[in-house]
Amino acid sequence: MLSIGDFARHGQVSVRMLRHYDGIGLLRPAYVDPVTGYRNYDAGQLAELNQIVALKDLGFSLDQVRTMIADGISPTELRAMLTLRRAELEQTLAEGAARLTQLEARLRGIDAAGPAPAVVLKQLPARRFVGLTGSAASFTPDDITPVIRPLCGELGNRLAGAEGVHPAGRLTCLYERADAADEEQVRLRATVPAAVDADGNRNGLEVYDLPTVRAATLVHRGPIDQVLPAWQALARWIDENGYRSAEPARELYLDCPDDPAQWVTELQEPLAPDTVH
């Protein structure tokens, strides 16, 4: 027999909680001293206590836990429920980490009063791209990321089966408003520069021809989900130097090793022809 204090310690619950479980008939002591009233538990009851705590952690009320135990929930069923709950918590943690990353990017944007960004003006030549098109509800990372990432993956799959397409450059993502009258809706494309055979099999890939354009460019080093401050710095530079942006904006992925912190991406913002000087 274990005293209530020892049982609480081994079960990692409070003595007060054990008394409450006894009071509502959820977990009775194995023996109660008729003279002192001291509660004593059998070591075998730890398994039952673990089951109660596990069900509580899943969000069930004590009344629901009592009913489930009375109905005889099996260890297999409990394990399945806990596995599902673990997956839900992992998803919540992942979403929280993503939001924290976005928050940190916003903070860096607020504090970006340091040295002027190393913006370079370039003449981007006319090029043919092949790729896939998607749309997002807005330019926010929450709307863009779930669309562009799978689009890039599908682009790789399609290229592998395209017999008439000859890639000639690196992955480039294009972003522009889907409708001039709609400030929110975004058209985005995952592309690569490529030569295309007139009678070849493009395997469902679309062809985009972009004209020669003058662009302001800035190199971002680090994870692409932390690119916001760099884009904002480029926008400030364009405004402060009397230019106006055109579309589509481009992200050219120069180096993408396994460690996202080592990524190198060139941001390319085309400039409206009537503002180029």
Image (tube, grey):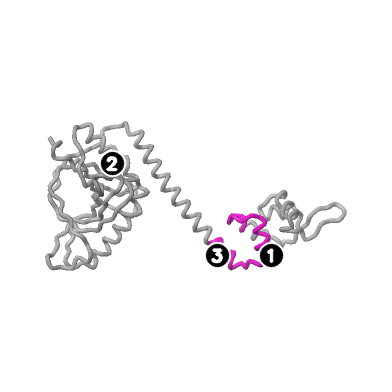
Question: Residue 184: x percent and y percent?
Answer: 31, 45
Question: Residue 145: x percent and y percent?
Answer: 34, 51
The type of residue carrying mark 3 is Ala
* Residue at disc 3, secondary structure: helix
Query: Whole-Å distance between the Cαs marked 2 and 3?
Result: 45 Å
Label count reads 3
**Quadrant assignment, res 158:** bottom left
The residue at which mark 1 appears reads as 70
Which mark is in front, 2 or 1?
1
The residue at which mark 3 appears reads as 80
The type of residue carrying mark 1 is Ala
- For the C terminus, the image quarter is top left
Question: Residue 244: x percent and y percent?
Answer: 20, 37
73 in magenta: yes
The residue at which mark 2 appears reads as 231
Label 3 neighbourhood size at 10 Å, few (<14), some (14-19), many (20+)? few
The secondary structure that most of the magenta stretch takes on is helix
Give the mark, 2 or 1, whose residue is nearer the N terminus: 1
